């Protein structure tokens, strides 16, 4: 990816179009995440889990002070700083994007990171220590089969998976594509 991050921004037309994908996807994720968290708090607080698809999907309100899958309980400040770093790095690379697929991937990551960052900054118990609202449980209503998650978590996972696919297929941030021949040893270096 280092070669893909050239020092020069792309020409205005293409760069603006790609940047609009990044911003649009991030704003869509942030909006849907925020709206569903508000709805979850207002409709699920103090209620037993709600079955959406019996045996498969349930809605249950939880507050997560840790990372994904509730790992890192007690490290909320560190996780908040990591999220701020992720947002900063994506913003820094945004003007160099030339690939719509990378813009979508990074938009999903940016929207997801920002959605959970908003919770960490503005929810109880206070700034940089706030608990993230999670409310989707799969396979059972307690989160014991698979951790309870939210829209931001889903966007983060999908964005990261897309980034891995893009990287593995040689697609660079600037829109170029690296092709390796069978005899090319460069593709074997990990």
Image (cartoon, rainbow, N blue to C red):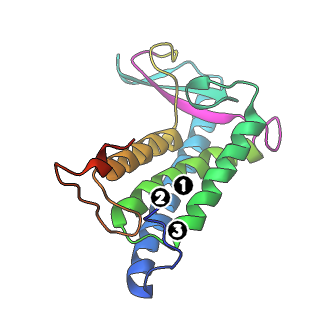
Q: Name the residue under label 1.
A: 110
Disc 3 to disc 1: CB gap under 8 Å: no
Which mark is first along the chain, 1 or 3? 3
Residue appearing at x 44%, y 57% in the figure: 1
Which label sits on residue 70? none
Q: Mark 3 points at which residue?
A: 94
**Residues under labels 2 and 1: Cα distance?**
5 Å
Outermost residue toward the bottom in this view: 12
Side (left or right) of 48 relative to 80: left
Q: Which is more foreground, mark 3 or mark 1?
A: 3
Count residues near mark 3 (Cα–Cα under 10 Å), then give few for <14, some for 14-19, many for 20+.
many
Disc 2 to disc 1: CB gap under 8 Å: yes
Q: Give the range drawn in magenta.
A: 123-140
**Residues under labels 3 and 1: Cα distance?**
11 Å
Given residues 20 and 88, the one toward you in this image is: 88
**Relative to 165, residue 137 above or below:** above
Residue appearing at x 39%, y 41% in the figure: 190
In the rendering, at what x and y percent does residue 65 appear? Answer: 70, 30
Side (left or right) of 141 relative to 71: left
Q: Name the residue under label 2.
A: 107
Element assignment for label 2 = helix
In the rendering, at what x and y percent does residue 143 appear? Answer: 51, 18
Element assignment for label 3 = helix
Q: Does the magenta stretch include residue 147?
A: no
In the rendering, at what x and y percent does residue 20 appear? Answer: 45, 73
Residue appearing at x 50%, y 13% in the figure: 144
């Amino acid at each position: 990816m280092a070669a893909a991050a050239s020092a020069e921004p792309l020409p205005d037309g293409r760069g603006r179009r790609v940047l609009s994908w990044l911003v649009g996807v991030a704003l869509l994720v942030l909006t849907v995440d925020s709206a569903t968290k508000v709805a979850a708090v207002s409709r699920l607080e103090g209620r037993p889990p709600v079955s959406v698809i019996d045996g498969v999907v349930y809605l249950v309100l939880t507050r997560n002070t840790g990372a994904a899958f509730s790992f890192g309980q007690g490290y909320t400040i560190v996780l908040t700083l990591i999220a701020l770093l992720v947002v900063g790095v994506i913003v820094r690379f945004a003007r160099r994007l030339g690939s719509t697929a990378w813009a979508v991937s990074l938009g999903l990551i940016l929207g997801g990171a920002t959605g959970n960052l908003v919770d960490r900054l503005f929810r109880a118990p206070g700034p940089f220590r706030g608990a993230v609202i999670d409310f989707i449980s799969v396979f059972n209503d307690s989160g014991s089969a698979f951790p309870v998650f939210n829209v931001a978590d889903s966007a983060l996972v999908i964005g990261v998976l897309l980034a891995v696919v893009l990287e593995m297929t040689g697609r660079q941030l600037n829109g170029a594509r690296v092709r390796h021949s069978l005899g090319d040893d460069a593709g074997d270096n990990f």
